[in-house]
Amino acid sequence: MSSVGISPAHAVYPPKVVGHEMLGYITDRNGIDYSRDIGRSISFGGQHYFIFGDTFCKNEQGQFVGIQSNTVATIGSRSDPCDASYPYVQPNSVVPPLIPHSAEEYQYENDHDGCRIAHWVFGGVAETVPSLGFMWYEKLMIITNEQGTTVEACGVGIAQITIDDATGVLQATRFPGMIFNVDEPRFGSTSLVVKDDYVYLWGRYGSDTLLARVPKDLVWLREYYTYWDGVDYSNDWKTAVPVLKGIQQGAIIKSTLFGPQKPWIFLGCTEWADSQVMVGASANLEGPWELTPVFKAYGLRYESWMYCIYPHQWAFDEADGEVLVTWSEHWPGNVIAARLRFEIESPKFWQRVPLANYSWAICQMLKPGRPDARAVAEHCGVELSMVGQWAHPGMSLPDGVLPLSLHVEGVDVDKVAEAVMLLGQMLRVKARAEAAANPPAKKEERRTGLRKAVSRFFRRRKSNATRPHSSVE
């Protein structure tokens, strides 16, 4: 194990955006200027895709030919994140949906003028095994008449996602009915994470965002869903507590952007139509989450408020503090992409002071937060932490367990070296004081006296055994 090094630099927290670059609209290689929204990307089966919401389809002449409530496009490469393409467009220039209508839904639309059934995918995909996953979609009825347009929610459904072996196109197969009804939280419609044996699902209920989880091989069975109640996962969704408040859309992702202590990141937007990019990080999926506004999104052609704000990890290197973020303009706009640059902290230098040869009492005196350790940390402007495990002299540690040491870290290499020197001096002083209180010579004298006493005992016993016994007449 190395005793010196440099810690990787991460973005500062609370987060701060120090620059941005507008990359333009997400375009299609066929050259047609589609109006569409959502623009959440997914990684599935080793390929990246954009999932769009309402897509206003046009022909090559730019004439409107129909609307689909959800479409999926393949992303070309990391080098050009705005380049995408629909793998198939119907002869009538309508882009086929990912989440299809059922026969009954087609019939309902035909029988009801002004009614459109929509299936919107905001939460992404949960890839439970390679090239097999699930999407949770919101079903809605959009009714347009002389009084205007109304939107009626119908609940949340599930679709199984696979890849067609012949064409490489994503395919969705819907499960019957709704997994969550219209009067229940929209679990799975905000964000999804697959971790260990579970799919974690965030969904809105009013202005609150709640959290559920389900075994990843039983996602279609409602009875296996459990809900975070602030302490544990409960069987009753009504016990669930908010983990986020006032959020409209966004994604929770695992990231190295803010370092190993905060591996889970939320990036999204509020429900207040303020176009703010909100960012927060947490050690746990359950939170706590504290969100910070870091950037105000804006349009390229249309200046209404922006929505459907999402991060896309596949595009840029997080080690550089760069994140691809997209947001949606209102109709007749499109999805806009931008590169946000987060402020990166200064690199930190570290050195470790070995403690394995010192007593447990001395090690406790130098624990971070104790007076001596705190004085050195404050004087040198460094951070201290214990690494490894202490063992009694002569005892070995289990395999893979490091010997105890004091980890010294700071942005100034000279201050780190000074702290290590001061801590070393403290250790030597304390070791001498401890030795003076328990002189080795006295211990040796006690051991020598014990050996002499034992030796006299055995000599006396041997003498008694060889002495002749007197007989009694």
Image: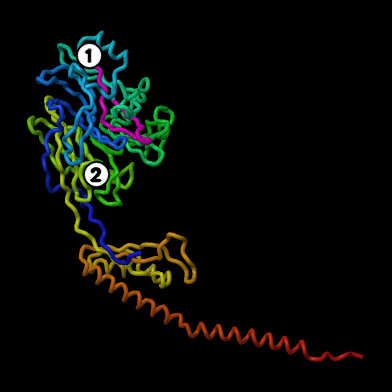
What's under tag 2, amino acid-wise?
Gly
Across and down, in percent, residue 299 comes to 10, 33
Across and down, in percent, residue 302 comes to 8, 30
What's under tag 1, amino acid-wise?
Cys
Label 1 neighbourhood size at 10 Å, few (<14), some (14-19), many (20+)?
A: some
Residue at horizontal 17 percent and vertical 48 percent from the top: 342
Within the image, what quadrant is residue 411 found in?
Answer: bottom left
Residue located beneath label 1 in the image: 115
Q: Earlier in the sequence, mark 2 or mark 1?
A: 1
Label 2 neighbourhood size at 10 Å, few (<14), some (14-19), many (20+)?
A: many
Q: Secondary structure at mark 2?
A: strand
Residue at horizontal 16 percent and vertical 22 percent from the top: 56
Within the image, what quadrant is residue 90 found in?
Answer: top left
Front label number (2 vs 1): 1
**In this rendering, would 216 be left or right of 95?**
right
Q: Which mark is residue 280?
A: 2
Q: Which mark is residue 232?
A: none
Was residue 132 drawn as part of the magenta stretch in this picture?
A: yes
* Boundaries of the magenta span: 115-137
Q: 224 above or below 153?
A: below
Residue at horizontal 41 percent and vertical 39 percent from the top: 197
